[in-house]
Amino acid sequence: MNTATDSADFQTPRRPTLPSLLALPFSLIPSSVHSTVLMTALNRLLATYIREGEFEFLRDRVLAIQVRDAKITYQIRYAGPAGFIACQSSEKPDLSISGTIYDFMALATRREDSDTLFFNRRVVMEGDTALGLELKNWLDGMDFEAMGRPLTVLLNTTNHLIGAYERFRR
């Protein structure tokens, strides 16, 4: 029995990360700008859910979303009918979620199960775990196709790009 070969058979596949050179431009942009862009996109994409009060469990809670390989941290808060607003980086987050671009794309496209991503610590939640679980469950139950064609096209394209990348790496 060749233990070197056997142990290699059980390794988790290496996940892609954003090369440092491509991450550099992102790190030069202030985090408040990143958060404002994300907040604006969320408010447009989730407008129906915001009007229906779906995010009351997040009201006045600060969320930090860190994309490790891009060296970006988004800091946002749900402010009721006004939707999501950008927060100052000095505000202490109630919940922090971190992962790589690849892992967040796998989560968004449902290419990989959220429980697997969290269990394997590829996407990490820290802080208020009850809030994190509620957010995870809300996202798991979300119908992305009901949100309209632009999001569906974006997620399908992302899913195809991930698939092509994975086939190319083999």
Image (tube, rainbow, N blue to C red):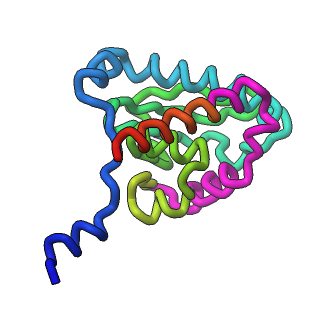
* Residue 92 visible here: no
Q: Nearer the viewer, residue 113 or 50?
A: 113
User: What residue is rendered at 40% in x and 23% in y?
Assistant: 31
Does the stretch in magenta take in 144? yes
* Residue closest to the far right: 52
Chief SS of the magenta region? helix
| Residue 138 belongs to magenta span | yes
Residue depicted at x 68% and y 28%: 153
Give how far across and how far down residue 79 sits, in percent.
67, 33
Corner quadrant of residue 112: bottom right
- Residue drawn at x 35%, y 20% as measured from the top left: 26
| Quarter of the image with the N terminus in it | bottom left
In the shown orientation, is residue 42 left or right of residue 98? right
Residue 139 screen position, x and y as percent: 66, 49
Q: Which residues are magenta?
A: 127-154
Residue drawn at 47 percent across, 37 percent down:
164
Residue 161 in percent (x, y) is at: 50, 33
Say which quarter of the image contains residue 41. top right
